[in-house]
Image: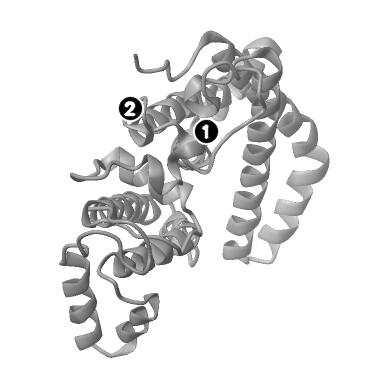
Amino acid sequence: MTPKLTNGREIAVYAIAQIVKIALVAVLAGPVVAPLMRSIAGSSNYALAFLVGAGFSLGWAVLALVLFLILRGLVGGTPETITGPGRERAIATSGAEIGAYAIGWVLQYMITLAYTYFAARWVYEQMAGSDKVIFDIISYGPPSVFAAIGLVFFLVVRKAIMGGAASLLLPSLAEDAVERPSGSLGFGDSIAIGFSKYANFRGRARRSEFWWWALFNFLIQVVLNIFDAVVLPGSIIGLSMIAGLGLFIPNLAVSVRRLHDIDKSGWWLLICFIPLAGAIVLLVFDCLRGTPGPNRFGPRTA
C-alpha cells in the first residue's frame, strides 16, 4: 500500500511555522526591514532593492522550513515517504522534499508579489480609516491565505516528485540500487532523482530521466519569464535568473550522468563551447541509448 503523503499533524505544524514566520515579519518589518528598504529605494537602485527584498523573503522561508521540520519530527508528523515505516518522530527530510518546498515557496512568492503590485495599495486605500480589527484582518489575511496556498503547492509538488510510488522512499532515492532496472522513468520520478542527486556527478542517467528533467527546467523558465515580464518589467534580476542559478548544478550533474550512460566522460560537455557543432554533438549524445549492461561508470540504468 502506498504510504500517505501527509497527515493532520504535518499540516498543523506547517501552519504553526507559518504563523511564527508571519508574527516575526510583523514585529521586525517596521524597525528593521522598512528603514533598510526605504534607504535602498532612495538610491534608485531597484535591482538591489529587489535582491534585498527577495533575500528577506527567502530568509523567512528558510526559517519557516527549519521550524516546520523540527516540529514535525517532535510531534510525530513526518510521513513514511520521508523516514520509512516506524520513524514518524525522526527529524528528517531529503533533497527532493526541500526541492518541493522550494518550488512551493517560489509559487507562493509569485502570488505574493502579484498581490503586492496589483492589489495591495488599492485594498489599503479602501480600508483607510476602518476599524483596527478590520484593518488587521486585511493586513494579515492575505499572508495567511498565501501560506495556505504554499502548503497546497508543497504537497502537490511533493506528490508529483514522488510519483505516488511506495518504492520511491526519498532517503533511498539517490541510491542506484532502488532505481528500476528497466523501462523509462516518469516525470515525477525524474524530478525527484534530479533533486536527490543535486550535486552528484557519479553514476548514470537514462534518457527518460534526462529529458523529463529538461522539460521540468523548460516549464519553470517559461512560467518565471512570463511572471518577470508582467510583474517585474525592466528588472535586471528576476525570478527566472534566480531559478536558473539554483538549478545550474543539478542541470550540470544530470548532463554528466547522461554522458556516463553512453560510456563517455563528463568532460565531453566542454564541446559545447564549439559554436553550433558542439551543441549538435551533445544533442545527439543525449538522444543515444545507454550502453547495455554495466560500464565504467556503473550499472545499466536504461
User: Can the viewer see residue 117 in this picture?
Assistant: no
Q: Tell me which amino acid carries mark 2.
A: Ala
Give the alpha-carbon distance from disc 1 to disc 2, as whole Å: 41 Å
> From the viewer's perspective, is 192 left or right of 287?
right
Residue located 52% across and 43% down the image: 95
Q: Which mark is residue 75?
A: none
The residue that disc 2 covers is 165
User: In the figure, 129 relative to 91: above or below?
Assistant: above
Q: Tell me which amino acid carries mark 1.
A: Ala
Residue located 44% across and 36% down the image: 111
State the image coordinates of residue 165 (x, y, percent, origin top left): 33, 27
Closer to the camera in the image, 261 or 195: 261
> From the viewer's perspective, is 143 left or right of 6?
right
Instruction: Locate the N terminus and report the quarter of the image it occupies.
Output: top left
Q: Which mark is residue 120?
A: 1
Q: Earlier in the sequence, mark 1 or mark 2?
A: 1
User: Can the viewer see residue 165 in this picture?
Assistant: yes
Q: Secondary structure at mark 2?
A: loop
For residue 91, what is the image quadrant?
Answer: top right
Q: Are there few (<14), some (14-19), or many (20+) residues within 10 Å of tag 2?
A: some
State the image coordinates of residue 292 (x, y, percent, origin top left): 20, 61
Counting the numbered discs, the total is 2
User: In the figure, 133 relative to 59: above or below?
Assistant: above
Q: Secondary structure at mark 1?
A: helix
Q: Are there few (<14), some (14-19), or many (20+) residues within 10 Å of tag 1?
A: some
Q: As drawn, which residue projects farthest toward the bottom?
A: 274
